[in-house]
Amino acid sequence: MKNKRGFTLVELLAVIVVLSIIVGIAIPTVLAVSKSIKKNMFCKKIQMIEEAAVNYGQDNYPLISSSSQGITIKISELVINGYLKKDVKDATVGHGAVIDPRNSASLDNYRIKIYMNNNISKNRVRATCIENDCNNLCD
């Protein structure tokens, strides 16, 4: 009887089918986890930006307190005034200085509302992102 060497075509096809099933299950799972991580990163970044806006509001207290509705600023203004660092060192402010982790788009034009919260005695300046995806994703 001849000595067999290597694998038969059926054995190779069986291995390919098993590997394709594993890949078919793994890829959607990895993509879902990746999307969830990017969403969480976005929400944490928005929280950090809102904290920077509160600091801006506390430093510019007369401007905030004189307006009953609060003021609205862009994230790029926080970068320009030194309250927030650029994500991309060489980026020009207003054109990708702060990056959205979900899709690498610029957050520079996102608006943050800074207002007074008179119901609280300490730390009365508050800030919130007023863009739709901030409110829809991070509530």
Image: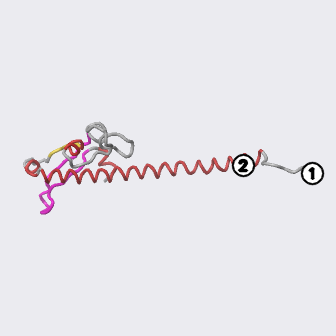
Q: Position of residue 70 (x, y in %)?
A: 14, 48
Taking depth in this image into account, of 93 and 33 the one nearest to the observer is: 93
* SS at badge 1: loop
Task: Look at the image and say whether residue 116 sits in the magenta stretch.
Answer: yes
- Relative vertical location of residue 95 with respect to residue 130 in this rendering, above or below: above
Q: Earlier in the sequence, mark 1 or mark 2?
A: 1
Left or right: 12, with 52 as reference point: right
- Residue 118 appears left or right of 112: left
How many numbered circles does the render carry?
2
* Left or right placement of residue 21 versus residue 33 in this view: right
Residue 14 among magenta residues = no
Q: How is the image coloured?
A: secondary structure
Label at residue 1: 1
Magenta extent: 109-130
| Horizontal and vertical percent position of residue 46 | 29, 50
Tell me the residue at 14%/58% (across/down). Answer: 124
- The residue positioned 87% from the left and 51% from the top of the image is 3
Residue behind mark 2: 14
Per the model, the C-alpha gap separating discs 1 and 2 is 26 Å
The amino acid on which the numbered mark 1 sits, given as a three-letter code, is: Met
Q: At label 2, which amino acid type do we have?
A: Ala
Looking at the image, the residue that sits furthest to the front is 90
In the image, farthest residue toward the right: 1
The residue sitting at 10% across, 52% down in the picture is 61
The local crowd at label 1, few if under 14, some if 14 to 19, many if 20 or more residues have their Cα within 10 Å, is few
